[in-house]
Image (cartoon, rainbow, N blue to C red):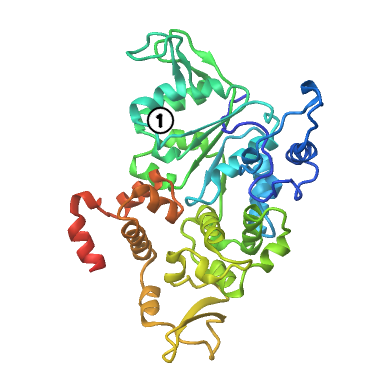
Amino acid sequence: MPAHLAVAHAPARPVGHASPLGAAYPNTAFNNIAAQAARIVRVPAATPAATIAPVVPLARQLRPDYLAIDDLSGTDARMRDLLARGKRFVDRGLPVLILGETGTGKEFLARALHAYSERRAQSFVAINTASLPEHLIESELFGYQRGAFSGALPGGMKGKLQQADGGTLFLDEIGDMPYALQTRLLRALSEREVTPLGASQAVPVDVQLICATHQDLASAVAQGTFREDLYYRIAVGVLTLPTLRERDDKTELIARMLCDEWPGLRVDQALARVSSDALACLLTHSWPGNLRQLRAALRYACAVMSGDMLYANDLPPELVQSRPAHTSNTRCVEVRSAESGGVTSSLSSPSSPSSPSSLPLAEQRAQDTPHERERERILQALAQHRWNISAAARTLGFCRASLYRKLKQLSIPHVRDCGEALSAGHYA
C-alpha cells in the first residue's frame, strides 16, 4: 500500500467564525471549555484547591483556530464541490496537491483534510519549504543522527517525515523547494522510508502527503526547475482553490470574520453594523491577498472604528484609495462633487445608462494590466511604511517571504539599493 504525506496538529477545531463562548458551535469541545470557564469565574475561598477546575486563559480561548472541512465554504458551489473531492481523495489515501494564490486558505484546507481523515488522531506536521535556508531543509525533512555534523544536537533529531509517521505531512510552498532536494524527497516517497543524515539504516515511514503552492508547477516542469517525476508523484489529487474575488459567498465570509472581532454577535447582527458603502467596497475590491488580506482589513477597521457602525473610511487607506475591481454585475464608483469636494461611494451596474462617471485616475488604472496594478499597490504600501518589509507585508496581507518573492517577480529593487531613484520616479 503506497505511503502518502500531509501536515497539521491534531483534530481541527472550529475557528475563524466562532465567538469566544462557542455560541456558534454548541456541540464542540471549544464550547465546553468556555462554559467550564464561565462556571468558575468566582470560587469561594473555602473551596478545596483539588476541586477547582483549571481555568483556560481568555487569550487561548480567543485564539483563532482552524475550521472543520464542512465550515470552509458557505454558499459557494465551486468550494463545496472542491471540498467534496478533497474528502474522496483522503478517503482513498491519495497524495493531495493544493493550488491557489497566496492567502486563499491552502493550509486551512490541509488541516481540515487531516481532521477529516482517519489519521486525525495522529500528528499533523507542517513545514514551509520556502522559509528555510537550503542547508537546513534536508536535516529538517529527514533528521540526523548524533554527531552527523558540527553543531548537531547531542541526541540527534527526528525529521519532519518521521514526526508525521502515521499522520499527515504538509509541505507548503513546495514549488520553491531546491531542485537538489527534490531528488531525495522523491526517493523517500517512492520507497516509503527515510535515511537521516549520518545514519546507516533507513527508517520506514507511513504518512499522508499534502503539498501546497501558489506557483504553476506544470510550467516549472516545462522550464526544468521542478522534477517531472516528483510532480506526478505529488499531483495525484489536485485541488485548486478559487480566489476571493471569484467566490460567491463573500458576504458570509465577511460576516463570519466580523463575528470573531465582535464576540457574541450572530452573523445577521454583524452585517447590520456594516454600512452599505463599506460593504460595497469590501465586496467589489479585487483582494490580491485573498482571505488573508480580507481578514487583516476587517481587523484594522474594527480597531479604528468609533461607535457601533463600520463605515468606508474605517477601512485601510489603500482599500479606499484604490479603485475596486469590476465584477460581473456591479462596481464601486467614487464621484467627486465639485461643490463640496466630498467623495461618495455607490453601487451601479456597468451597463446602466445612469451610472455616474468615474474619476480620470480610476479610468486610467482600469486600463492598467493586473501586473502593473499589483506592482503599484506594493510600491504604495512600501512607501507608506518607509520600506519596513514586515509592516508592508501585514498591510498587503502577505507574509514576509511572499512579499520578498513578489518584489523579485515584479522586478522591484530594494530601497537600500536605489531608494532615491525609486522614490523620485514613483512618488515625486
Quarter of the view holding residue 28 = top right
Q: How many marks?
A: 1
Q: Is residue 402 left or right of residue 291?
A: left
The answer to whether one can see residue 192 in this image is no
Q: Between residues 384 and 408, which one lies in front from this camera angle? A: 384
Q: Is residue 396 left or right of residue 354?
A: left
Q: Residue at x 55, y 42 (%)?
A: 107
Looking at the rendered structure, the kind of residue marked 1 is: Gln
**Whole-percent x and y of residue 346?**
55, 80
SS label for mark 1: helix
State which quarter of the image contains the C terminus. bottom left
Q: Between residues 208 and 278, which one lies in front from this camera angle? A: 278
Instruction: Bin the neighbour count of mark 1 within 10 Å (Cα to Cα): few under 14, some 14-19, many 20 and up.
Output: some
Seen in the picture, residue 132 relative to 407 is either above or below; the reply is above
**Whole-percent x and y of residue 411?**
27, 54
Q: Mark 1 sits on what residue?
A: 182
**Whole-percent x and y of residue 158?**
49, 17
Q: Residue at x 51, y 36 (%)?
A: 234
Seen in the picture, residue 277 relative to 399 is either above or below; the reply is below
